Amino acid sequence: MEKYFKPQPLKRTFLSKGVIVLLILTANGIVWSILRFGFGLGAVTNLSNQFPLGMWIALDVAAGVALAAGGFTTSALVHIFYREDFHVLVRPAIMTAMLGYTFVGLSVVFDIGRYYNVWHVPIMGNSNSVLFEVGMCVMAYLATLYIEFFPIVNERFIGRVHLQGVLRFLNKPIDSFLRFADSFLGKTMFIFILLGVVLSCLHQSSLGTLMLIAGKKVHPLWQTPISPLLFLLSAFAVGFPMVIMESLTASRSLGLKPEMDVLRKLARFIGPLLGIYLAFKLGDMVIRGTYVYLNEINLQTVMWVIEILFGVIIPLRMFFEDKVLRSRTLLYTASLLVIFGVALNRFNVFIIGYTPPYMVQRYWPSIGEISVTLGFIAIEILLYRALVMIFPVIAVPLKGVSAKAKYAIRGVIQ
Amino acid sequence: MSQSRRSFLKAMGTISLTAVSAKESKATPKNILSDDRLGVLVDTTVCIGCRQCEYACKVEHGLPAGDIDDYSDRSVFETRRRPDHTALTVVNEYPAEDPRQKSVTVKVQCMHCDHPACVSACIVGAFTKEENGAVIWDGGRCIGCRYCMVACPFQVPAFEFNKAIQPRIMKCDFCYETRTSKGLTAACVEACPTEALTLGKRYELIQVAHERIRENPQRYIDHVFGEHEAGGTSWLYLGGQEFLKLGFPDVGTKPAPSATEPIQHAIFKFFVPPVALYALLGGIMWLGKQSSEEEE
């Protein structure tokens, strides 16, 4: 018998043991943030004139953007390639992408020295600069993600705006705004869905172009002219593992039955996607002859082997195995490996592979940098938990409902 | 149905048009390559390591310079220094291959590239290559992202990591504001007591350099560093030994922006690839919608 799913706000108590740990991490991150803004980057980070970019750019921004790829890959799969069978995954994927990109933006603000000048970017932009393109696309995509999330806000609050006290007079205008937005987005959402996918492809690849200008500073194992293509292909490959990991984590934490049928079907895409990425990565290596560097054993080559072996080859093999697709634990492990591989790849390109000509000391993230990053991740998870309790994001099975109630996302051409 | 298809196409058209016109209004920063641009020829075989240039530079740029007598202290040469936010130029000492010479001293500062990586990389166009050859930084635009530092093949721009507000990117500005834009010579060149530094038009300096090499083939190696390095630089060096042994990086002869600008310009040439991708995905979406309607 077919089951029918409807996204609903989940009723749970917010506080749990995990939440307390996350709150502690958040507090720790806030303390370090105050130091960063009070005393400058040098007080908190290990950045120097030799290593101008550190963990906040490599992990929070570069890896953060890659790991938020679940949003555009899932929305492309469902809305553009019309795979309605994956519908239940779209809302959580869009919401995590929205949270992810929000924190990418915040990380940038933490990292740049004159954060209060960030509005210069759209006004004074230099069209030769790769960073400008990345910045503009990320800003535009972040706005697109908020628009894509808006139908969920509408669904939750239309007819339910009940502000109290002095704000009561706002109830009616807000409600009519929501109704207007709902009907407007209902007709135009396909524009934003397409725009989101195009913008994602643009900046996912341009992140790979970013380090090309550094030339010989980046180790030849990663410094390749097809770096933008590799970044794009790895973003395609990591999108679905992120969706699977988040879905399994959320269902465990919120006490739901995981949608193993849907996730298993989704997992079947990952093997081929990883295979394409690996083929280009190794093909590039053979053509440029960079395998010669693997003869030496040093930090770079060891990290490269870890990245490829544990991050690509092993999960690639796992995703072609029926046993893995059937087991919740193995599926979770394989997805985590892909995520680890792509995050490590970004870390390698931006930090491990980066050797400036006049290096005195290699860069390693400081306690402050790690604290801020962990704080961001903690807030992100807390917001996820809060949002799924406020908004209808996660689909739960409905009991005794007829086929007519088959769930459809608002705002897509019906 | 036909109504929604028409609005679909119309909306796609509007989106691509607005995207194109918005992008075209963006300016690229100034990168003038005047034939008469200035340069400085540094003859490392003449430099005596007196560090008067360091002192003059600090005074010129209002940096704490200390006592001029301290600059004769040669113990600073025990470590290799880099230009940073306290000194825009530094002199380093290297062992000489020529047994008649004890050591070679080399002044380091921004090379003022002809195709500067920092100008190409800067997200807000805070760097410009001026007509007289100087590559300068505009603090009014800078957002402090430090991408210029990643891009620079000579690892020159420095950042004030310990300032919470208005941290500056610090590098040699060829004394643009105070001197070279007014026809005056740069502070370091003026201070040099041995004429190891010669300021002049870049093309003339290249001729002078090759003449010196021709006249003293024992004294120099036949290579003017900066003539072709990184696509050519305004500062040029003569040396008595391989430049790699004088602390110069191996940067090749291709300008750094040649690795990224062709990619950027290919993607954004009239916005064809993004618009084509948008149209392609839109087509797939529309076809998928047709077939899913037929099923129902």
Image (cartoon, helix red, strand yellow):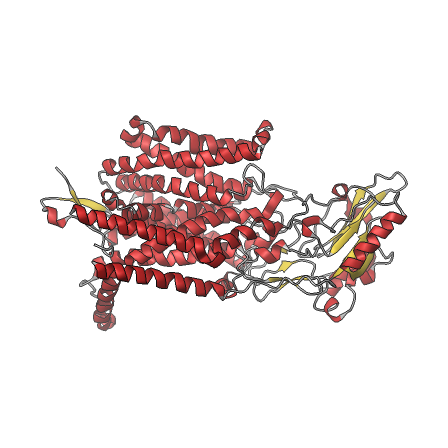
Residue B282 at what x, y percent from top left? 32, 53
Direction from residue B234 to residue B208 in the image, left or right: right
Residue sitting at 29 percent across and 59 percent down? B8
The N terminus of chain B - image quarter: bottom left
Tell me: B146 left or right of A272: right
The residue closer to the viewer here, B258 or A370, is B258
| Residue B134 against residue A235 in the figure, above or below | below
Say whether residue A233 is visible.
Answer: yes
Vertical side of A359 occupied by B26: above or below: below
Direction from residue A245 to residue B121 in the image, left or right: right
Q: Is residue A220 above or below residue B162?
A: above
- Which quadrant of the structure image shows residue B40? bottom right
Residue drawn where x is 55% and y is 51% of the image? B262
In the rendering, at what x and y percent does residue B181 appear?
72, 69
Q: Quadrant of residue B218?
A: top right
The mark tally for this picture is 0
Nearest the camera: B101 or B225?
A: B225
Q: How far across and how far down the image is residue A315, in percent? A: 39, 31
Q: Position of residue A361 (x, y in %)?
A: 63, 42
Residue B66 visible in image: no
Out of A412 and B190, give the one closest to the viewer: A412
